[in-house]
């Protein structure tokens, strides 16, 4: 399994066995023997290989010449770097619901990566690169969704009406904006499909019956 991951990464970056051997400080014959399955590398060397072929390789090893990536890989790397930069500067992951076209594009790319992982169609090296920047595969986002849903449900039960988008109360306005967004997704206005479990929870509180002015139809 480890050898296959390494070979896939080498193919992705067009790195030969000799260049990789030089990068981690072993002989060329030693690397060839490892890749063919005739010998093993120490744990520390394996870690060096993964670091080299991951994000570290692209940024910190300019002395190892790479052939150009194909167009699809080039686009993926460009998007990866944009998402990484966005997260570093903003502190959150780009949202596919953003009204800013650039941010929405990055957000949709993130949605696609999560979906590819879910159906097993993301390569190991791409997953490792995303893991290296702490990419949120959906668990944190789902927790935040559930937290907001419970807050909305609690508000409706306590106050007896739906939150008002233009309320002076920031928490109420935030819940109202979130509710509006969920309804838009269901109606297809956001270009995204709502997960079935989310839809079932929203339907359980009759969320489509509100007119977003604090009243029910």
Image (cartoon, helix red, strand yellow):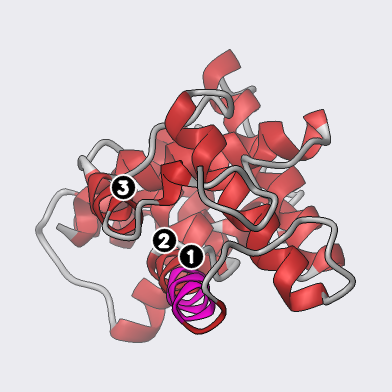
Badge 1, how many Cα within 10 Å: few under 14, some, many 20+? Answer: few
Q: Which one is in front, 190 or 206?
A: 206
| Numbered circle sitting on residue 141 | 1
- Circles 2 and 1, Cβ within 8 Å, touching? The answer is yes
Residue 6 to residue 152: above or below: above
Secondary structure of residue under mark 2: loop
Residue 66 placement (x, y as % from top left): 63, 34
Mark-to-mark CA distance, 2 and 3: 17 Å
Can residue 67 be seen in the rendering of this structure?
no
Quadrant of the rendering where the N terminus is positioned: bottom left
Residue 190 to residue 117: above or below: above
Q: Circle 2 is placed at which residue position?
A: 138
Magenta stretch: includes residue 102: no
Disc with the residue nearer the chain's start (2 vs 3): 2
Magenta stretch: includes residue 152: yes
Badge 3, how many Cα within 10 Å: few under 14, some, many 20+? Answer: some
For the image, the number of numbered tags is 3
Mark-to-mark CA distance, 2 and 1: 5 Å
Characterize the magenta stretch by its predominant secondary structure: helix
| Numbered circle sitting on residue 199 | 3
Badge 2, how many Cα within 10 Å: few under 14, some, many 20+? Answer: some
At horizontal 45% and vertical 68% (from top left) the residue drawn is: 149
Secondary structure of residue under mark 1: helix
Q: Nearer the viewer, mark 2 or mark 3?
A: 3
Q: Is residue 6 left or right of residue 210?
A: left
Question: Image quadrant of residue 193?
Answer: top left
What range is drawn magenta here? 147-157
| Numbered circle sitting on residue 197 | none
Residue 5 placement (x, y as % from top left): 28, 51
Q: Which one is in front, 145 or 215?
A: 215
């Amino acid at each position: 399994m480890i050898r296959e991951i390494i070979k896939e990464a080498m193919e992705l970056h067009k790195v030969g066995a000799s260049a990789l051997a030089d990068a981690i400080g072993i002989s060329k014959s030693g690397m060839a023997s490892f890749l063919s399955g005739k010998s093993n590398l120490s744990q520390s060397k394996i870690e060096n290989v993964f670091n080299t072929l991951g994000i570290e390789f692209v940024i910190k090893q300019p002395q190892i010449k790479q052939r150009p990536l194909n167009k699809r890989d080039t686009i993926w790397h460009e998007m990866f770097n944009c998402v990484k930069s966005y997260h570093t500067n903003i502190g959150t992951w780009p949202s596919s619901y953003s009204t800013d076209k650039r941010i929405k594009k990055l957000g949709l790319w993130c949605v696609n990566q999560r979906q590819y992982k879910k159906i097993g169609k993301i390569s190991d090296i791409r997953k490792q690169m995303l893991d290296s920047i702490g990419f949120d595969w959906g668990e944190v986002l789902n927790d935040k969704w559930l937290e907001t849903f419970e807050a909305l449900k609690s508000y409706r039960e306590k106050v007896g009406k739906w939150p008002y988008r233009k309320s002076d109360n920031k928490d109420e306005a935030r819940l109202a904006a979130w509710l509006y967004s969920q309804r838009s997704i269901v109606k297809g206005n956001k270009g995204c499909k709502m997960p079935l479990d989310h839809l079932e929870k929203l339907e359980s509180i009759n969320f489509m019956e509100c007119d977003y002015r604090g009243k029910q139809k």
